[in-house]
Each structure stands twice: as structure tokens, then as C-alpha cells.
């Protein structure tokens, strides 16, 4: 069974703080993703990575960066947290691209971040 | 980039009725269309998916149809039950496992 874990379920930070959100998967997946979820806006892609040390910008990368030093771990970094980054952050992973079986994305439980 | 539109945003049905959620996409390169269900306070979970070489797929009470020419796909839930109440998201991607573009979600309420 695929397991995707995130370091915190709830996090409260102050404006201007540097924030690290960690995501770990235990299925040797190549691909990892960070989304944010806001009411009425669905899930929006922040960054993704198809390999270790590789990263690509998604639809809303401004104010965020990522790090993928190891295959199983993908970190989302808020360089200077702002109130408009208050949101639910969801990490996901998948085995790889292509047409090999049902290999969709599996999500972590989410981190609800509040920036005061 | 890809734009996925999802309708309706809310849907209320009586238990036992059918529910239909529709999505359209803009990028003809999209070939993979999953549907996720998210119960309150939980993570999104895949319930069914379809690829571009298939027009319809069914899994018990759930079915998905795809019209590539018109660039739209739909989720059909028959004989709805209260436990079907959740938010449903459609998504599109060029390949299985690649980054997904999600619709904004449909909040389905099934009343007994």
C-alpha cells in the first residue's frame, strides 16, 4: 500500500518566517508534486519533480521553492511566509510517466498552514 | 496550459438517484483523465480513471465517459448513497503519473 506522509497536519507561522513542509513517500516513486487547495479553487500545482534534484514550476510557483535531495523526500519552502499563503498543502507522488498500469498520483494527508 | 472546467460546483440528490458531473478540457494533448473523491478532512483518493483510447469505463456504481472530439468527460454515479457525499475532482494530464490539472471540484450531497 502506497504511503505518502507529510511532516505536520497543522502549522501556524508568522508573516516573514521561513517555512518548511516535508513530504516523504515509501514506494520508490520517481514523481512528486506539491499542490495547494483552497475553497472554490480546487487543487493548484505549485511545483513538481520527475527525478532527484530535478524540479519544475507548476501553475502558482511564486513565493515558493522546493528541494529534492533524495528520491523519497520532497520539501516545499516558503521563503518568507505571507498571509495569502494560508492554505491546505497537499503532497502527492506517482511511479512514473507512461502507460504502465494504473499509476495515478497518491496524496498525503495534507498540512493546513495558517500564516498570521 | 491546460484548463479544466468542472460543473456543477454543488449537486444535491436524493438517495437512490443518479448524479452526473461534467468536465471539459482545453489541451488536445491530454490523454489521461482521473477522478478523485475527497471526503471531509481527508486526502483525495482516486475512484476511477480513463485514458484517451477508451470511450467509457465502469466500476460497479461508478462510470466515466470520454468524448475526445468534444474534449469533455463525465462521472456518473448510480444508486447514490449517503456515503457518496464528498467533493469530487476531475483532472487531466498528458500521461499517467504526470502533473495533473484539476477542475475546481463538485460538492455532492446525497440526502436520505
Image (cartoon, coloured by chain):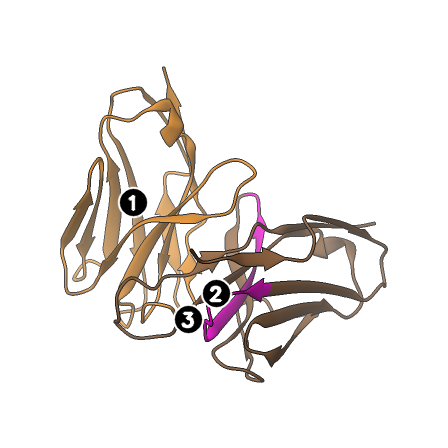
Q: Numbered disc 3: what chain?
A: B
Is B62 on the left-hand or right-hand side of A110? Answer: left
Task: Look at the image and give the residue range highlighted in magenta.
Answer: A24-39
Query: Measuring 77% from the left and 53% from the top, which residue is drawn there?
Result: A83
Q: Are marks 1 and 3 on the same chain?
A: yes
Residue A15 position within the rendered picture, expressed as x and y whole percent measured from the top left: 85, 58
Residue B18 position within the rendered picture, expressed as x and y whole percent measured from the top left: 24, 28
Is B25 on the left-hand or right-hand side of B61? Answer: right
Residue B59: image quadrant is top left
| Location of mark 3 (residue) | B1
Q: CA distance from mark 1 to mark 2?
A: 26 Å
Say if the magenta span includes residue A25: yes
Magenta residues, dominant SS class:
strand
Say if the magenta span includes residue A51: no
Kindly state the secondary structure of the residue where label 3 is placed: loop
Is B91 on the left-hand or right-hand side of B18? Answer: right
Q: Numbered disc 2: what chain?
A: A
Residue B48 position within the rendered picture, expressed as x and y whole percent measured from the top left: 29, 49
The brown chain is A
Residue A69: image quadrant is bottom right
The image's mark for residue B3 is none
User: What crowding class fits label 3: few (fewer than 14 Cα within 10 Å), some (14-19), or many (20 or more)?
Assistant: few
Q: Earlier in the sequence, mark 1 or mark 3?
A: 3
| Location of mark 2 (residue) | A93
| Location of mark 1 (residue) | B22
Q: Measured along the vertical axis of the image, is residue B94 above or below residue B21?
A: below
Query: Measuring 58% from the left and 84% from the top, which residue is drawn there?
Result: A53
Foreground label between 1 and 2: 2
Residue B90 position within the rendered picture, expressed as x and y whole percent measured from the top left: 36, 51
The orange chain is B
Query: Measuring 58% from the left and 66% from the top, which residue is drawn there?
Result: A60
Amino acid at each position: 500500500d502506497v504511503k505518502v506522509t507529510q511532516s505536520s497536519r497543522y502549522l501556524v507561522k508568522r508573516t516573514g518566517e521561513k517555512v518548511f513542509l516535508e513530504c516523504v513517500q515509501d514506494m520508490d516513486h520517481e514523481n512528486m508534486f506539491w499542490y495547494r487547495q483552497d475553497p472554490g479553487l480546487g487543487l493548484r500545482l505549485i511545483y513538481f519533480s520527475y527525478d532527484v534534484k530535478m524540479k519544475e514550476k507548476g501553475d502558482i510557483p511564486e513565493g515558493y521553492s522546493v528541494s529534492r535531495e533524495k528520491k523519497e523526500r520532497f520539501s516545499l519552502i516558503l521563503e518568507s511566509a505571507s498571509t495569502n499563503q494560508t492554505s491546505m498543502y497537499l503532497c502527492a507522488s506517482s511511479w512514473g510517466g507512461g502507460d504502465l498500469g494504473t499509476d495515478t498520483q497518491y496524496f498525503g494527508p495534507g498540512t493546513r498552514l495558517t500564516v498570521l | 496550459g491546460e484548463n479544466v472546467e468542472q460543473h456543477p460546483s454543488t449537486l444535491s440528490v436524493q438517495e437512490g438517484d443518479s448524479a452526473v458531473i461534467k468536465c471539459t478540457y482545453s489541451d488536445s494533448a491530454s490523454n489521461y483523465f482521473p477522478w478523485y473523491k475527497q471526503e471531509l478532512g481527508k486526502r483525495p483518493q482516486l475512484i476511477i480513471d480513463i485514458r484517451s483510447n477508451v470511450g467509457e469505463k465502469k466500476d460497479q456504481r461508478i462510470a466515466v465517459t470520454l468524448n475526445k472530439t468534444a474534449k469533455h468527460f463525465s462521472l456518473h454515479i448510480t444508486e447514490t448513497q449517503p456515503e457518496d457525499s464528498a467533493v469530487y475532482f476531475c483532472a487531466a494530464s498528458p500521461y499517467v503519473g504526470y502533473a495533473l490539472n484539476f477542475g475546481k471540484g463538485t460538492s455532492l450531497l446525497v440526502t436520505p
